[in-house]
Image (cartoon, rainbow, N blue to C red):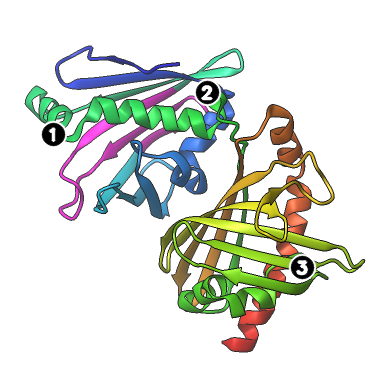
């Protein structure tokens, strides 16, 4: 499935792609602040959301982190929202933002179990549009943008599941919550299912590094797991691949459910307000078969319970050290 770029007038860019997911899921991916961070932008970019109000007149403020290490400040103002069919928004408008202003209409048209997404961006003048195309690679970037959406929603054979999301507010400053996630002495106090005891662990906290740990269940069975860190933006965000493992750190299957996906991509975001910290965890199965994705998605209720117990342990630990 490739994107089709058309320019009906000399002030417009139109991009379209058939996404391998139902209309409601595709619309959700555009309007869920946790999901947009997984796919928004051209290849190589990541996105951090600071505020997202999906309503007419609402504002989405976000930073796009480029592969060149530069941060790009962005603002979208929603003008029209018709779930799950249509979004209209304006981009730019403030002095502290990227100097690119335009209005976009996104339509979501169901085609069986798939969705035709069409983005129509209108620029102030033809010259302005041509400059954006030449200097910012708007057409190529837009095609990559829609391709990443397709990948996020398990298109193109990537094996990516729907997202599991859980959020919790802790009565502790963000630096302390971050520290509990980034130091071995903290992790060993709270990480893991309720009732499990810590056996051993190592932590190499850097992009490409590993957190490897062993635990023992109440019945005495050992469980090993690992994180491989992909992105660390202190103290705002960390992205890592979660797997069950063997004692040497190799990937294994779930010790109780061998049909569980071998790898999950987790994104943890940390935001602070009034001395309290909101931790949001976004998890998707990656490189998974259709059957494994279904097992993962069917397990959301049990994941909710499991993570709730783990976050209860984190809250208790933070209360002790705050």
Residues in magenta? 79-107
Residue 9: x, y in percent?
18, 14
Disc number lying in front (1 or 2): 2
Q: Residue at x 15, y 53 (%)?
A: 95
Q: Is residue 226 above or below residue 43?
A: below
| Residue 84 shown in magenta | yes
Does 165 sit above or below residue 233? above
Label 1, label 2: how many angstroms apart (C-alpha)? 29 Å
Q: Which mark is residue 135?
A: 1
Image quarter (top left, top right, bottom left or bottom right) of the C terminus: bottom right
Q: Is residue 176 magenta?
A: no
Gap between marks 3 and 1 measured at Cα: 52 Å
Q: Secondary structure at mark 2?
A: helix
Secondary structure under tag 1 reads helix
Res. 88 visible in picture: yes
Disc 3 crowd rating (10 Å Cα; few below 14, some 14-19, many 20+) is many
Label placed on residue 156: 2
How far apart are the two marked residues, 2 and 3, measured between alpha carbons?
Answer: 37 Å
Residue placed at 33% from the left, 20% from the top?
15
Q: Is 145 left, or right, of 138 in this rendering?
A: right
Which one is in front in this view, the residue at disc 3 or the one at disc 1? Answer: 3
In percent of width and height, residue 11 lies at: 16, 21
Give the mark nearest the N terminus, 1 or 2: 1
Give the numbered dot on residue 215.
3
């Amino acid at each position: 499935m490739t994107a089709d770029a058309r320019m009906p007038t000399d002030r417009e860019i139109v991009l379209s792609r058939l996404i391998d997911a139902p209309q409601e899921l595709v619309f959700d991916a555009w309007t869920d602040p946790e999901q947009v961070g997984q796919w928004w932008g051209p290849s190589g970019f990541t996105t951090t959301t600071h505020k997202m109000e999906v309503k007419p007149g609402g504002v989405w403020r976000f930073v796009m982190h480029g592969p060149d290490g530069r941060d790009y400040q962005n603002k979208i103002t929603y003008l029209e929202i018709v779930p799950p069919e249509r979004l209209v928004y304006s981009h730019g408008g403030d002095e502290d933002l990227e100097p690119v202003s335009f209005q976009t209409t996104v339509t979501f048209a169901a085609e069986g179990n798939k969705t035709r997404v069409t983005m129509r961006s209108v620029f102030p003048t033809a010259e302005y549009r041509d400059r954006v195309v030449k200097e910012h690679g708007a057409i190529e970037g837009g095609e990559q943008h829609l391709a990443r959406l397709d990948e996020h929603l398990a298109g193109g054979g990537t094996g990516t599941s729907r997202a599991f999301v859980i959020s919790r507010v802790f009565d502790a400053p963000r630096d302390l919550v971050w520290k509990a996630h980034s130091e071995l002495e903290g992790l060993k106090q709270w990480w893991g299912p309720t009732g499990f005891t810590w056996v051993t662990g190592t932590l190499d906290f850097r992009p490409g590094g590993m957190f490897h740990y062993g635990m023992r269940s109440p019945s005495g069975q050992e469980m090993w797991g690992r994180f491989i860190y992909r992105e660390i933006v202190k103290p705002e965000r960390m992205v890592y691949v979660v797997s069950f493992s063997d004692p040497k750190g190799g990937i294994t299957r779930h010790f109780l459910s061998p049909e569980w996906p071998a790898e999950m991509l987790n994104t943890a975001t940390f935001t602070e307000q009034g001395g309290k910290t909101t931790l949001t965890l976004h998890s998707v199965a990656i490189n998974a078969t259709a059957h494994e994705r279904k097992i993962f998605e069917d397990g959301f209720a049990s994941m909710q319970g499991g993570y709730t117990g783990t976050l209860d342990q984190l809250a208790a630990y933070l209360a002790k050290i705050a």
